[in-house]
Amino acid sequence: MHKGFYTLKWEGDSVSFIDQRKLPVEEIYVSCRTYKEVAEAIETMVVRGAPAIGVSAAYGIALGLIKSTDTEIYKYEAGFKEICDIIGATRPTAVNLFWAIERMKKAFAEIRGRTSSVSEISAHMLSEAHSIYDEDINVNKAIGRAGSSLVKSGMNILTHCNAGALCAAGYGTALGVVRAAFEQGKKIHVFADETRPFLQGARLTMWELMKDGIDCTLLSDNMSGYMMSKGKIDVIVVGADRIAANGDAANKIGTYSVAVLAKHHNIPMYFAAPLSTVDINCPSGGHIPIEERNLDEVRVINGKSICPPDAKAVNPSFDVTPNSLISGIITEKGIIYPPFESGIKSLFSGGDL
Amino acid sequence: MHKGFYTLKWEGDSVSFIDQRKLPVEEIYVSCRTYKEVAEAIETMVVRGAPAIGVSAAYGIALGLIKSTDTEIYKYEAGFKEICDIIGATRPTAVNLFWAIERMKKAFAEIRGRTSSVSEISAHMLSEAHSIYDEDINVNKAIGRAGSSLVKSGMNILTHCNAGALCAAGYGTALGVVRAAFEQGKKIHVFADETRPFLQGARLTMWELMKDGIDCTLLSDNMSGYMMSKGKIDVIVVGADRIAANGDAANKIGTYSVAVLAKHHNIPMYFAAPLSTVDINCPSGGHIPIEERNLDEVRVINGKSICPPDAKAVNPSFDVTPNSLISGIITEKGIIYPPFESGIKSLFSGGDL
């Protein structure tokens, strides 16, 4: 779908991922032949980005079931539970992981009510994973269409981390908005925060935008405030890893700082995410678990220490932007504006915006 | 003076610098045997930090004169002008460079009025450079004493870039405040922003604090907002590269973002700098030139691209924090509080605070 790359793909008896840790220097695909390899790919960030983690989890579960050697239904069922537990233990913040697991569990219960044939169940579960994959792309395109109305020709858009084709089955959430505006012929320019410590902005966002011919410029994270003060940023669009019922949004570390800076400069800031990113059972951002990752992600870059090797460091992988700093949440059902709680509630009870 | 290292040292017929680009992985000293080598050391950031740049410029000028082969006074004088021009063209933002050059020019004019002997002039100029060096250390210690009253035991102090012993002849400005509090037996902890793109916080601040046994923790730049929101930062102390007459302060890129975040969280933010950093002829921050450095500082880390090699990037090396975001300016004469204009004016006309 994109120019010469895909984020993840079902390959019949394996799941193939572009190794996002190697980009942009090398474009290498990794083939995961067991569900444990898929879990490891999620945990070590071969694949990352909330929607992509959800789709990967679904395929990982399908793969685990297809490769199961348990022909006895109760053992097979216990195996399914273990697969879900192991995949669910990979990354705590992105709710899409748990959303996908829940959806696969529902599909399992549904088909199990109709059959005890493990091969039938496995086939059904793979078909459910394919649906999740296909829906993800459609949802991203719908997010893009909804959000593109916010982007006018001539605008400079700031984004943080990578909420692009690489964070999803394809197209992207925040970069879905960018892509839709670009496809509509609008003349736009993207500033990409490099996004330390993992550098997703520098490595992934710049790579995929340049691949699609979208004009873009790289910033160190600490330059965005300066660029805002110089009037160089018109709008900010980022993704989200989990959105609470009140609209508080967890996203890659640094997003909160961008939001405070945006508020100070009166620049609108939007979060683009599928409804599967909304955790309706989570009342507010304070309840979202923040993943702490290995400190060497902070201390080491490109294989070399940037500080004394025994330096203390912190590595919170996400932060939470309170709803008061959010201009709108762009979903596949349209843009939710403040007050978010009622808009979110309405969408989740089958209503409109 | 510090535990096993010095920033720069006069060596009789050369100036020796610790190569700050190699820290903390290697502790290597570079010997500059000509003034052009000193200019290059400043430009390529072997030595950096506003006060250290000033002291280096003074020694560079003295070295150039001592090594001059012009015995004829008018040629020697023309040579002096050229030395000042070349050293003055290295880095545009830090005003200490121009302050030191001006001071050396005054010393030259003064001795020239008394003698035409080039060797006498050279000896006098070296003595002036030594004075600048010695004064810098004393001034830093006075800044430390003045600022230490702001730091209570148990406090967590955030700093950005390196305003430490490595940014000056020794002791440091912002880290001078930290050192003075530490020497007074206060139990303190420092959070150091890594400070992309050049990573002075990770490489230099962490290194020199750990060397002196001061408790410290490394942060990626985009984590400081999150840490503030969690109540982990009590006070912020940074250095400055040029302070305008109204108190607007230029410092390493990212300082402005920290200041906006500090304001949002009601955390006091101080700039520590010698009066030689105040440019009394510069009415406000908008008049301070912002150095743009090589884009590969942003695109390449530890010798390896972090983005597609042909990616566009920006690299403003400094930003300006408006006086409205500054709680106080810590100088060797005491702490200037708002309104800064009158306080600065008073100090420059020989008055008190």
Image (cartoon, coloured by chain):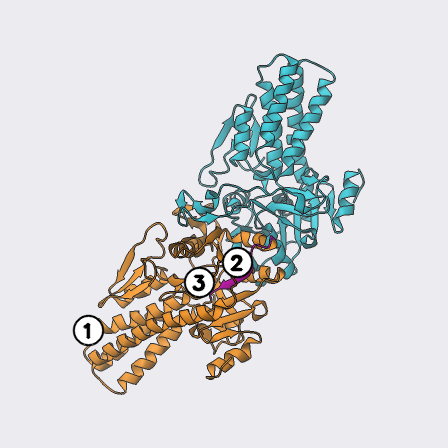
Chain colours: A orange, B cyan
Q: Mark 3 or mark 2, which is nearer the start of the sequence?
A: 2
Q: Which residue does the numbered mark 1 point to in the structure image?
A: A69
> Residue lying furthest front in this view?
A185
Pinpoint the chain carrying mark 2.
Answer: A
Instruction: Give the image location of residue B230, x and y in percent.
Output: 57, 63
Q: Amino acid at mark 2?
A: Gly
Circle 2 crowding by C-alpha within 10 Å: few under 14, some 14–19, many from 20 = few
Q: Amino acid at mark 3?
A: Leu
Horizontal side, residue A12 vs residue B334: left or right: left
Name the chief secondary structure element in magenta: loop
The secondary element bearing badge 3 is classed as helix
Q: CA distance from mark 2 to mark 3?
A: 17 Å
The residue that disc 3 covers is A175
SS assignment at label 2: loop
Q: Which mark is residue A154?
A: 2
User: Is B211 left or right of A56, judged from the image as shown?
Assistant: right
Mark 1 — on which chain does it sit? A
Residue B95, horizontal then vertical, whole percent: 65, 38
Same chain, labels 2 and 3: yes
On the same chain: label 3 and label 1? yes
Q: Can I make out residue A104 in this image? A: yes
Q: Earlier in the sequence, mark 3 or mark 1?
A: 1
Q: Which quadrant holds the N terminus of chain B?
A: top right
Q: Which residues are magenta?
A: A230-239
Identify the residue at horizontal 33%, vertical 68% (top origin): A56
Q: Which residue is found at the position 74% from the left and 48% from the top? A: B340
Q: Could you tell whether A92 is left or right of A117 in the image?
A: right
Residue A231: in magenta span: yes
Q: Nearer the viewer, residue B200 or A263?
A: A263
Give the CA distance from mark 2 to mark 1: 57 Å
Q: Position of residue A73 (x, y in %)?
A: 22, 81
Could you tell me which secondary element the residue under label 1 belongs to?
loop
